Amino acid sequence: MDLRTDYPYWLLSGGIIRSYTSLERDIRTDIVVMGGGISGALTAWYLCRAGFEVVVVDKRHIGMGSTAASTALLQYEIDTPLTELCRKVGEKNAVLSYRLCLEAIGHLADICRSWPEAGFKWRPSLQYASFKKDVAMLREEYALRKKNGISLQWLGRQDIMHKFGFEKEGALLSRTGAEVKAYNLCHALLHHGGRHGLQVYDHTEIVDIQETSRGVVVKTHWGNTIKARKLVIACGYESAKYIPQKIQSLQSTYAIVSEPFESSHLWYRNALIWETARPYLYLRTTADNRVLIGGMDDDFSDPRLRDRALPYKARALARAFCRLFPAIPFRTDFKWAGVFASTRDGLPYIGSLPGKPHTYFALGLGGNGITFSVIAAQIIARLAGGHQDPHAGIFGFDR
């Protein structure tokens, strides 16, 4: 699958951080992870820390699929508002999903604490009402989160103008959010995982999977085999071909990055910013004082249509920024597009399918892909160790 255009900012700014050899022999291991993006890397990290021998394989270079195009806003807010999620999955599971995302950001902070290359920074998160009609919905969201112990503030028109410099009727300001360099973090996880025996192979595509009574046997396009007790499929949007039911809808999404600004302070604590409209715009800053803005999603994933739309979408994103911040001169320096997947309830899919007890899926679909991947990695590490996980059912394929 063609997952993105050729020039995402993170790849151009970071380059190929590390490369690995392809698999050239038959091997055995405890667990083989299929997918060397951020989901696979996080899962491999947790599994190694749990004491498993782990092998990661990817048909591309590491992190060169969707991870290189990720805008990497770390938010506990799920694409589906809490009020709506309660109607879809019940209040208990909805609130727990939000809480698990909150905790996942903290776990990422702990992981990245000694890895400055990952670019982790705590940021507040602001969601503003795109239109006056959205204020009532946003107030209902505020009340429900407060009722369930989630810390946040309501900002009125004057508060928003004072802190952010633009005019909107209402907004939610959450203290807990963060940003990261997903491509760099992916490489750091796999590199440091090597200290725990992690093996990584580039350009090694899995072309056949067989479950046995004791585990799995996978064959690569080179003709080699990997025998393992467990398989984790963490191929993101490309994992659908291994799943009998439809679990995702594919769209195209677009992003641009500005030229650097002289000031490192562009708005209140350089918060993450997003809105209530669907599809929504989202903004963050970068370590070198740029602004990243994304959105303008389309309901297609055809790479030809996506690539053809990119110049127009880039101009539309720049205009949207200038309407919000007319005093900040925005000049586009990088632009790219990629595939984006959503689920019916906004939650990821984690766990195994009936009849395949030795295969787990770690699918952090949606706008919270990285935080969902932390949750997936934790759940799978427990399941692989023979333990029950109290949260697995929320994200299962039978929900």
Image (spheres, grey):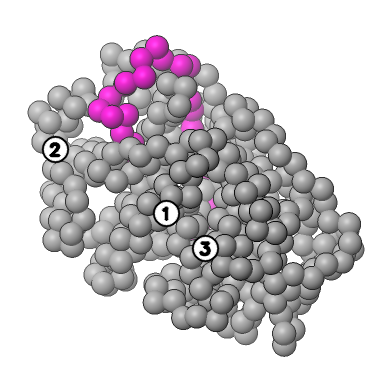
Residue under numbered circle 2 = 155
> Which comes sooner in the sequence, label 3 or label 1?
1
Figure check: 331 above or below 172: above
For label 1, the SS is: helix
> Which comes sooner in the sequence, label 2 or label 1?
1
Measure how far apart labels 2 and 1 are at the Cα level: 28 Å
Q: Amino acid at mark 3?
A: Ala
Residue under numbered circle 1 = 107
Q: Position of residue 357 (x, y in %)?
A: 61, 82
Q: Which of the pair 384/302 is nearer the observer?
A: 384
| Point 85% across, 59% down: residue | 221
| Point 50% across, 42% down: residue | 114
Q: Position of residue 257 (x, y in %)?
A: 48, 25
Q: Are dots 2 and 3 in contact, CB under 8 Å?
A: no
Q: Is residue 259 magenta?
A: yes
Q: Is residue 29 magenta?
A: no
Q: Would you call the spot at circle 3 few (<14 residues within 10 Å), some (14-19), or many (20 or more)?
A: many
Range covered by the magenta-colored residues: 248-277
